[in-house]
Image: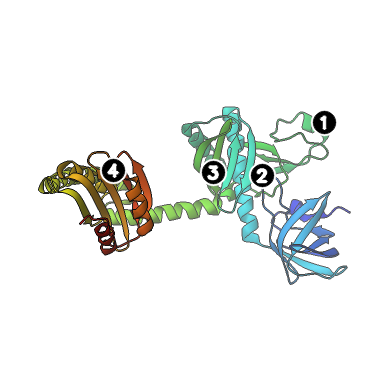
Amino acid sequence: METEKLYYQDPYLTTFTAKVLTCEPAKTGFLVTLDRTAFYPEGGGQPADHGTLGAAAVTDVHEKDGVIFHTCDAPVETGAAVEGSIDWPRRFDHMQQHSGEHILSGLLCSLYDCDNVGFHLGADTVTIDYNRELTWEQVLEAERRANETIWADTPVEITFPSPEALEQLHYRSKKELTGQVRIVTFPGADCCACCGTHVRRAGEVGLIKVLSCQKFREGVRMEILCGQRAYRYLSQVYDQDHAVAQLLSVKPQDTLAAVERQNAELTAAKQRMTELEDQLFSLRAQALTGLGDVLLVEPPMRPDGARKLADAVAKAAGGLAAVFSGEGNSHVYALVQADGGDITPLVKRLNAALSGRGGGRNGFAQGSVQADGSAIRAFFHKEGME
């Protein structure tokens, strides 16, 4: 016997009573069927409702051949009447996301002649796939019109047209449908075959915000947030922008300009630091002219600092320049042999002795070691190099 679907009669129903028809143990708990239910089963990209049946928690719901199975964490008495309670915040969130997706997809598909070919209502965001490429400007125009639809607050229409009426109706559908078809219409925005739960009026969606639109297969994949999710996200973004503005001593609406200015200053400072560092490396190398093999253990440098210093020292000293940069038991190294001779055996001994990783060729090697300055000096002392 098919389960009576109370969520279609009233998607705002949060409590109900029903008769327990079966209760069978399963891998994930107990599978319970009822004569009727307000629990929406997973389907069409929308997750299942959660809640309780009596004292048992409902952790999943799915439908097979018209029968709805409730996965519970404890058994319920077969043949008894049980009270069901829906996790309303979860249900209403899903209704907002799903309804918002309808409004946006209906507008995108009519404006830009594309089809919605994928929909997933995730725990954090809603993802939608479309079968043609869209520009960000097109997406923002659809977003603007979608929010205007929300502000108009028109009632949502849900109908089950006759086969004859359905043939005359222009509606969206991801697949060929047979039997009774449920049509969900957001006037001015969308008309779509859908089995999900939706709000009564467009205004209850609250807000639609598109987060991203990336190329995906032959079209694009879009991430959106609706309702409470969009409000929470935008509030978090504002709080973060406000905190950044305080650090930069500007108004929140001026943070971009302030960051661009600070970034330009930082770029100039890095360039000047590089120039000064190169001058310092040159002076240090000159002081080591003709000394042959040289070992230097230095404080932390920029990523390519050890290599640049080793290059300069090797040219001036005329032997092997071994430069280690770091602190504690973590150092990066650069080895440069002035005449380009093979230092592979030395690098292997170095890595083995100092828990190192790295290598190279043609008289050059770089890598890192897990050793302090004294261990590094002791290794090269054994190698005959002070």
Of callouts 4 and 2, the N-terminal one: 2
Q: CA distance from mark 3 to mark 1?
A: 37 Å
Image coords of residue 134 (percent x, y): 52, 31
Q: Which residue is mark 4?
A: 260
Q: CA distance from mark 2 to mark 1?
A: 22 Å
Instruction: Please state which of residues 26 and 378 is positioned toward the viewer in this rendering.
Output: 378
Q: Nearer the viewer, mark 4 or mark 2?
A: 4
Of callouts 4 and 1, the N-terminal one: 1
Give the side of residue 45 with respect to residue 377, left or right.
right
Q: Nearer the viewer, mark 3 or mark 1?
A: 3
Residue that appears at 85% across and 59% down: 35
Q: Which residue is mark 3?
A: 223
Q: Which residue is mark 2?
A: 156
Give the side of residue 70 with respect to residue 379, left or right.
right
- Check disc 1 and give the amino acid type: Glu
Q: Looking at the image, do the residues carrying marks 3 and 1 touch, with CB atoms under 8 Å apart?
A: no
Q: CA distance from mark 3 to mark 4?
A: 27 Å
Of callouts 2 and 1, the N-terminal one: 2
Q: Secondary structure at mark 1?
A: helix
Q: Which residue is mark 1?
A: 164
Say which quadrant the C terminus sits in. bottom left
Q: Looking at the image, do the residues carrying marks 3 and 4 touch, with CB atoms under 8 Å apart?
A: no
Image coords of residue 254 (percent x, y): 30, 47
Image coords of residue 282 (percent x, y): 14, 44
